[in-house]
Image (cartoon, rainbow, N blue to C red):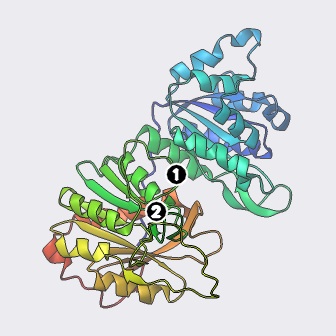
């Protein structure tokens, strides 16, 4: 099974297409044509550097509208005000590292960057850059800042770069950009009326006031699902362990630290929910007794720590559920399908999402992942390496199918075999 994809129409949409100084500027020509085919009216704003790669005349001929390039050109007075006022969205593709920095810091030294400070409409950025720039800490910080403000930043694709290197930095495929624009302007509201309860991030089990037992979970997958569910019309409560992520817009965030605190919050909200997604990496063990003072070295070469099991939150929720759809996660290092299927069965889940945390380019801390989705009826879907925000929509699509199946019927669909789809 492949998740259904509904290509959004942009009929009647007014867009500003910003083009910055990247070698990928030539791809903006094809993107412009695609946006026009989808029914959008597009004004193009180019930076001076972009005009070094491709002429404004090309965009003017294809769009049928004058291209704006500078703040101080006589025939373009106040365009930094009038264009965003008329636009339903501003799309910057390609967006260079320099542009992302200016947007994050609020710098306004040309028409396009000034336009962002006056705009009230959504901003969508599709970065393109070479070398290791996309993963540079400064770029990462700027992207995080923009996303926290509600800017949609589409992760670049991996592959050959202009320098001849291989890496992540290629402008996202045209279809992904068009789909992102459509989802913002004309989002699917197929989760309206649903109440989604999520857990995310790690838990921290204190050893003493300084140290704790935890894991490498960043919370990015759970936060991505929370954001996706909200955009699709759901009410969302996110119970999160400690992370460095900004709260998703429109989502009720409940912050916890320990497995016991997470169990209590999830249990209290279970009756409210219609869908439960357990992405949190909950510690399996905790110290039997946390010290009240920092433990000191005793001079001995070894030390023992007494541990006890924490509450199995997902099993406890499963035992109490009424009609909720339950989605679990299995982070594994080996025998992925065997362990995930066992967890699906033992905990009475409808869906389990299995991921190999040793996968290069995916797993804990990454913005991308590849997963295998196993359903109660035995269906298995492999989802390739892609941004976690895109995986989030795929996972919600599968959960939605099970919302349409009564609980009594779900219980009859035991996963006796696995069928690849």
Who's the residue at 71% across and 31% down the image? 59
Who's the residue at 51% across and 59% down the image? 220
User: Where's the C terminus, which quadrant?
Assistant: bottom left
Judge from the rendering whether residue 28 lies leftward or rightward of residue 263; answer left or right: right
Q: Quadrant of residue 300?
A: bottom right
As drawn, 25 above or below 371 = above
Residue 365 locus on image (x, y percent): 58, 64
Q: Secondary structure at mark 2?
A: loop
Q: What residue is pinned by disc 2?
A: 201
Judge from the rendering whether residue 389 lies leftward or rightward of residue 25; answer left or right: left
Judge from the rendering whether residue 131 lies leftward or rightward of residue 117; answer left or right: right
Sequence-wise, the earlier of marks 1 and 2 is 2
Q: Secondary structure at mark 1?
A: loop
Q: What numbered label is drawn on residue 168? A: none
Q: Are marks 1 and 2 in contact (CB under 8 Å)?
A: yes
* Nearer to me, 282 or 420: 282
As drawn, 373 above or below 109 = below
User: Counting other residues with Cα less than 10 Å from the Cα at mark 2, is it few (<14), some (14-19), or many (20 or more)?
Assistant: many
Q: What residue is pinned by disc 1?
A: 245
User: Where's the N terminus, which quadrant?
Assistant: bottom left
């Amino acid at each position: 099974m492949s998740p259904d994809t509904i290509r959004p129409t942009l009929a009647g949409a007014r867009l500003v297409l910003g083009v910055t100084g990247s070698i990928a500027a030539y791809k903006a020509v094809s993107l412009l044509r695609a946006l026009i085919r989808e029914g959008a009216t597009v004004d193009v704003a180019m930076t001076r550097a972009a005009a070094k790669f491709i002429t404004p005349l090309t965009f003017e001929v294809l769009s049928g509208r004058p291209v704006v390039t500078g703040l101080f050109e006589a025939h373009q007075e106040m365009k930094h005000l009038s264009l965003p006022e008329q636009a339903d969205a501003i799309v910057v593709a390609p967006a260079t590292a320099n542009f992302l920095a200016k947007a994050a810091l609020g710098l306004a030294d040309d028409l396009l960057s000034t336009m962002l400070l006056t705009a009230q409409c959504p901003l969508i950025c599709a970065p393109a850059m070479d070398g290791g720039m996309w993963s540079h800490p400064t770029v990462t910080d700027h992207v995080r800042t923009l996303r926290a403000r509600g800017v949609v930043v589409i992760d670049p694709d991996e592959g050959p770069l202009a320098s001849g290197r291989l890496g992540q930095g290629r402008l996202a495929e045209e279809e992904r950009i068009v789909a992102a624009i459509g989802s913002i302007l004309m989002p699917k509201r197929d989760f309206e009326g649903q109440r989604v309860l999520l857990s995310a991030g790690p838990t921290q089990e204190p050893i003493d006031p300084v140290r704790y037992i935890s894991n490498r979970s960043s919370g990015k997958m759970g936060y991505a699902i929370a954001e996706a569910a909200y955009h699709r019309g759901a009410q969302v409560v996110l119970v999160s362990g400690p992370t460095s992520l900004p709260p998703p817009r429109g989502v009720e965030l409940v912050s916890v630290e320990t497995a016991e605190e997470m169990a209590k919050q999830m249990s209290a909200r279970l009756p409210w929910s219609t869908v439960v997604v357990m992405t949190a990496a909950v510690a399996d063990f905790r110290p039997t007794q946390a010290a009240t003072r920092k433990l000191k070295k005793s001079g001995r070469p070894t030390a023992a720590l007494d541990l006890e099991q924490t509450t199995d939150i997902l099993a406890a929720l499963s035992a109490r559920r009424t009609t909720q759809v339950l989605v679990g996660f299995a982070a594994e290092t080996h025998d992925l399908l065997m362990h995930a299927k066992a967890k699906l069965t033992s905990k009475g889940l409808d869906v389990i999402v299995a991921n190999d945390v040793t996968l290069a380019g995916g797993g804990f801390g990454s913005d991308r992942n590849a997963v295998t989705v196993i359903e109660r009826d035995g269906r298995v879907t492999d989802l390739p390496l892609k941004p976690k925000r895109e995986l989030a929509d795929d996972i919600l699509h599968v959960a939605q199918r099970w919302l349409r199946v009564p609980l009594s019927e779900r219980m009859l669909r035991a996963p006796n075999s696995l069928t690849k789809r």
